[in-house]
Image: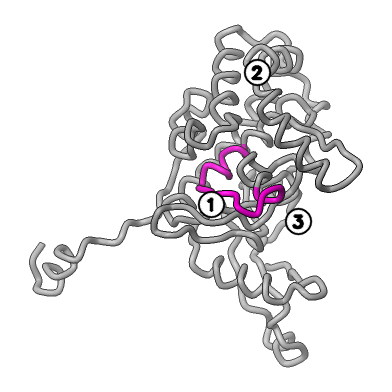
Amino acid sequence: MSVRKQALKGKDEELRHEQQLLSQLKHRNIVKTSKPSLLRRLMVSDQSEMYMENGGATLKTLKNLIPQRTALPTTEQKVKEAKQHMGQVVDALVYLQGKGVIHFDLKPDNILLNPVTGRILLADFGLARKTYSQGKIYAAGGTQGYMAPEVVLSFLDKNAPPVSTAADAYSLGCILFEMITGSKYLPTFGQTEEAQYASLYERSYSEYSEPLIRAKIQHAMPGIPPAQIDETVNLLMGMLNPDPQNRIGPREIARHPFFSGFCQPLQAPQKPGILKQIKGWLGYK
């Protein structure tokens, strides 16, 4: 079965870009595109439509699930569920990093869950971009409250430098924080859009505090052993570091003790070097 995604007015080019990019990505935790039915192709041009496989189930977004997490009976179950869901997103990010792709719009709305299988699917690649050979590209956008500081800076300064896949790691940190605490890491404040971006950028530094993050995690995780609190805080401090040069990336996140047993990264296959290709053509191993 598949679901249809239709381009918003004036967004046909963005949808075509998304469809083309997704056709190059093959991962269990990334949505797949599928062809529309013959009848649909005869009735409507599919240039402004994209079909995505849904595994035969009605998919839910993580945004729908976060409020429901308060109904889970124990803190241990909440933490385990966060690891199960986020571990699959980390797997997808490791794959995207290997492909040189930045999603740019990671948020609970764009993370889908198949309630039958428990499988997570990363969706909405409309802003996603492939990086240059140096592993960076100029920011394409995002959603306030989940954008990395370096992406926010691009809205405040036209001369802001290009960004790397570290931007997605920060967004994932914001989502993980929200799953554990039930509240956003950096809520949006400000009368104008520029004031909101300026506030987000300033607070990404001023609120990046180990004691502050620890206090919020301890409040949200009553009864959890101190060692597990330390583990959670250590991971979030690594992911939410406002300096992208010192922020941990997808591969480091996957190896962190917090996700032990919950991450099974499937990295993008690396292209063989030219010498190996020539040997292959000549029949040598």
Within 10 Å of disc 2 (Cα), the crowding (few <14, some 14-19, many 20+) is: some
Q: Is residue 5 above or below residue 184?
A: below
Q: How many marks?
A: 3
Residue at 48% over, 61% down = 26
Q: Residue 50 appears in which quarter of the rendering?
A: bottom right
Residue 14: x, y in percent?
67, 70
Q: Secondary structure at mark 3?
A: loop
Residue 183: x, y in percent?
79, 29
Q: Which residue in the protein does label 1 denote? A: 162
Residue at 48% over, 37% down = 249
- Spatial distance from mark 1 to mark 3, Cα to Cα? 38 Å
Q: Secondary structure at mark 1?
A: loop
Question: Which comes sooner in the sequence, label 1 or label 2?
Answer: 1
- Spatial distance from mark 1 to mark 2, Cα to Cα? 26 Å
Q: Which residues are magenta?
A: 154-172
Task: Say which of marks 1 and 2 sits in front.
Answer: 1
Front position in the image: 33 or 190? 190
Residue 209, numbered label: 2
- Residue 168 is a magenta residue: yes
Residue 95, numbered label: none
Question: Which comes sooner in the sequence, label 2 or label 3?
Answer: 3
Residue at 39% over, 58% down = 133
Query: Is residue 25 rendered to the left or right of residue 218?
Result: left
Residue 58, numbered label: 3
Task: Say which of marks 2 and 3 sits in front.
Answer: 2
